Amino acid sequence: MKRKQMIAGVLLLFFLLLTWAAFTALIQGAEVEQTRRENESLRYELGQATEKLIRLSTWMATMGLPTDIEPLEVEAPEAESPPDVEDEGSSPIPEEVSRASDFSASGLTYESADVDRYFPKGLGPHIEIYLGWRERYPEGYANLIKWGRAFLAGDVANYPPLQIDPAMYQACILAAVGQNIDCYFAHYPASPLNGYGRQFASAGYKYGVNPYLIAALTAAESTFAQDGGLSRNNHNAWGMRGDPDKVGAPLIDGWNWWPDWEAAVDGASYFVSVYWPGAQTAYSLRGYCEGNPPEWIRNVEVVRAGMEAKGR
């Protein structure tokens, strides 16, 4: 009897061991299958990324542009709602604003369905990458200026040979506008604003106002920042005097102050966006110059149009 019980116990233990071994093998098999599927998925994604990079490199080579581009992390500025301002005086009926002057918030929108076709997951174009070509790849930056001027003028014959991504399109616009402003300022070599064209363009895009207008205001207010202690001491070439809490610039001797010209260009653009949101021409700036006399408006508009014409 005891012998039979012993044999039964051994058989039961053997059965349990076999069951455990089979269960373990089943689990291991499932893990192996899961690993295999994950590896296949990774290989597929790698193949897709490689294919996209090849297409991207071919596209860049066809465009005559450099290919060693790395993505940059740049924080987008937070949008602010400009406060209401009092209507001071009247102004003449605005003239028609050309497409090249349209720097409203939607003025630099360009949709492209092919971006994902070229850029692998985790690698995407950014406007600062292309704008950085001015120092790193002058030939590529010259192409941005050429294409940007073509876009602004609607000159289809000089569009890029292939479709470009939205970031490059925006960089083309900013590069072209900045160059146009710099070309105009070059006629006034004593102006401290020489070389700040792209800062004007970027600030105008950021705040939704016309950068040509912001630059042109300096002609009427300070002869391109060449006249008056206000320009020398406050970096204020615009004769701006606004609420520091609204415009983010302190008052020194009763006028807004900025620490340098780069900050001043950005600050002046923001100033206009606060009191005259979306301003595109001098006709929009009601109350800027004590009633906006026709002569003042004409002076600003002649310069604004002259800067814009540099890209035509």
Image (cartoon, rainbow, N blue to C red):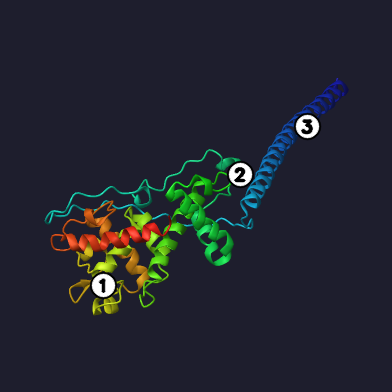
Does any portion of residue 159 appear in the rendered image?
A: no
Q: Nearer the viewer, mark 2 or mark 1?
A: 1
Question: Which is in the foreground here, disc 1 or disc 3?
Answer: 1
- Amino acid of disc 1: Ser
Left or right: 159, with 237 as reference point = right
In three-dimensional space, the C-alpha distance between marks 3 and 2, rounded to whole angstroms, equals 44 Å
Contact between labelled residues 3 and 1, with CB atoms less than 8 Å apart: no
Comparing marks 3 and 2, which lies closer to the viewer?
A: 2
Tell me whether circle 3 and circle 2 mark residues in contact (CB < 8 Å). Answer: no
- Which residue matches tag 1? 222
Which label sits on residue 118?
A: 2
Residue 74 is at least partly visible in this image: yes
Among numbered discs 1 and 3, the one appearing first in the sequence: 3
Residue drawn at the location 18% of the way across and 56% of the way down:
286
Most foreground residue, 124 or 148: 148
Instruction: Tell me the quadrant of the picture where the N terminus can be found.
Output: top right
Label 3 belongs to which residue? 25
Label 3: state its secondary structure. Answer: helix
How far apart, in angstroms, are the residues tagged by discs 2 and 1?
Answer: 48 Å
* Residue at left offset 34%, top offset 66%: 265
149 to the left or right of 215: right
Mark 2 crowd level (few <14, some 14–19, many ≥20, 10 Å Cα)? many
Residue 9: where, in percent of width, then height?
Answer: 82, 25
In the rendered structure, the answer to whether residue 118 lies left or right of residue 85 reads right
Left or right for 133, reference 260:
right
